[in-house]
Amino acid sequence: MSFIKKPTYLLLSLGSLAITYLALELIFPQLINYVPLTMYNALKTEIRVLGQSSKSSAVPNDYIALMGDSYAQGQGSWLIKTIKNSRYKGTNPDYHSGHAIYRKTGMDVITYGMGGAGSVKGMVTAPIISHLYINSLWPYTLSDPKRILIYFYEGNDFTDNSLYYTNRFLFKGYDESYFFKGYDPNLFYNTLYFDQYLQKEALERYHSYKNNSSFRHLIFTSFLSAGWKNLKKEIKRGTKKFINWFNSNEKKFEASFQGKYFSILNISLNTALKPNSSPKNMAIINGKNVLLPAYLQGPPVTLNAEQMKRSVYIFERSLLFIARFFSKSKISIIYIPGPANIYSIVGPMVSYELAGGGIASKERISKVSQEGCKKIYEIAKSNGFQFLDTRSYFREYAKTNLLHGPEDYQHLNRSGQILLANVIIKHILNNPANQGINTCKT
């Protein structure tokens, strides 16, 4: 090859590479819903709903949007098992109630669910920022959802909202590289004042709320960048794991000449206690005694009247805020019970999860759950939203089946997710008039 031809071939190679890269930038946005589940985190947070597989195309049509915390997100043993089974398969399998609804009805479903989120983040921040960001990108036009299903989980939504008042509304200082100025508690129940607070603190403080950078359109580039970072983390994690394994085997080899080697018993957070330990939750399932984890999530038995009032108020203002934003969407509220309020527990007391654990009577847990359900129902009723109390359906099913675990007892397992989907389909999607629904009956 002559000296003159070398630059020509180099330019042709660079040109071919540039054309290929441009083609990928054009094609990738339309195939984003085929991104494997185990690579889901490589997608930018604001566009992850497009990568979900509970819909027929990248951009959903006439779709259902789920909103809430980790229950809406789909966390649980079904997801844990799915990730384990598909780690190196490059697939995007089902793992939560949204998938079950999609498979059974054919309606596109996306979830804005955010693990650990209260009403503000789960119902205002996550859906609105994501919706606006997606519609700011060149390939996409995302319409409003046809229907919104808000998952209200009594296991921690009440307490999360109560803590939000203290840790966000009243908080003054730096948190996550942002300065919270603190707001006037005397104006907390002023609806106009709180709505302005939501606009500023739940939306405007986030950079992606009004991101005008031209680089945001490079979706494939962003995917590669995040993927490369995740790959480096995986390599680092794998290297560390190998070193620990090597050192462990080396110590075992040395110990074999020094006496008997005692292995360490690894106990997960959800490991059930031994039968003779205390406290414990023993449930009757299908006529047998089944030992559940020592501490179960349940209704907010520790909140006082004022804390409960604040919590419910935050939910209502967040609900009305999202209703104004998605003014064309039909909204339904799904009330979901915690495990402490589902199973038939043996004995009068239940150990519940809260700051290391506590104990409350079954009557107390049932009463607080009933009061909480009625408060959320009244909000739905007074504002013209559909409401579904799922507690009786979960309790009936739990007489013969486990709805949680075995890896994760805080969230629904596969059976629980499918049951939730079936109840929603029957009483919400196939019953638009909302008739005959058990609304907070004991």
Image (tube, rainbow, N blue to C red):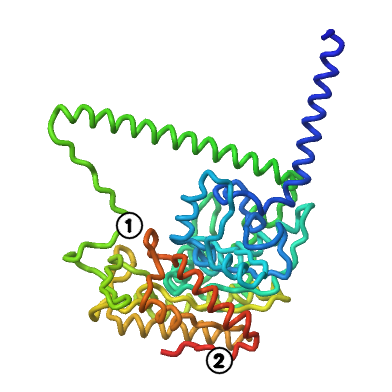
**Figure check: 287 above or below 357:** below
Which label belongs to residue 269? 1
Residue at horizontal 84%, vertical 8%? 2
Residue at horizontal 51%, vertical 74%? 420
The answer to whether residue 315 of the structure is visible from this angle is yes
Element at badge 2? loop
Q: Nearer the viewer, residue 428 or 299?
A: 428
**Figure check: 11 above or below 212:** above
The amino acid sitting under disc 2 is: Gly
Q: Position of residue 390 (x, y in %)?
A: 48, 80
Q: Quadrant of the N terminus?
A: top right
Q: Quadrant of residue 64?
A: bottom right
The answer to whether residue 188 of the structure is visible from this angle is no
Q: Nearer the viewer, residue 167 or 72?
A: 72
**Figure check: 157 above or below 44:** below
Residue at horizontal 64%, vertical 54%? 51
Residue bearing the label numbered 2: 436
Q: Quadrant of residue 369?
A: bottom left
Q: Position of residue 141 (x, y in %)?
A: 77, 60
Alpha carbon of mark 2 to alpha carbon of mark 1: how far? 40 Å
Q: Is residue 213 left or right of residue 178?
A: right
Residue at horizontal 30%, vertical 63%? 356
First in sequence, mark 2 or 1: give its number: 1
Element at badge 1? loop
Mark 2 Cα shell of 10 Å, populated few (<14), some (14-19), many (≥20): few
Q: How many marks?
A: 2
The amino acid sitting under disc 1 is: Leu
Q: Quadrant of residue 129?
A: bottom right
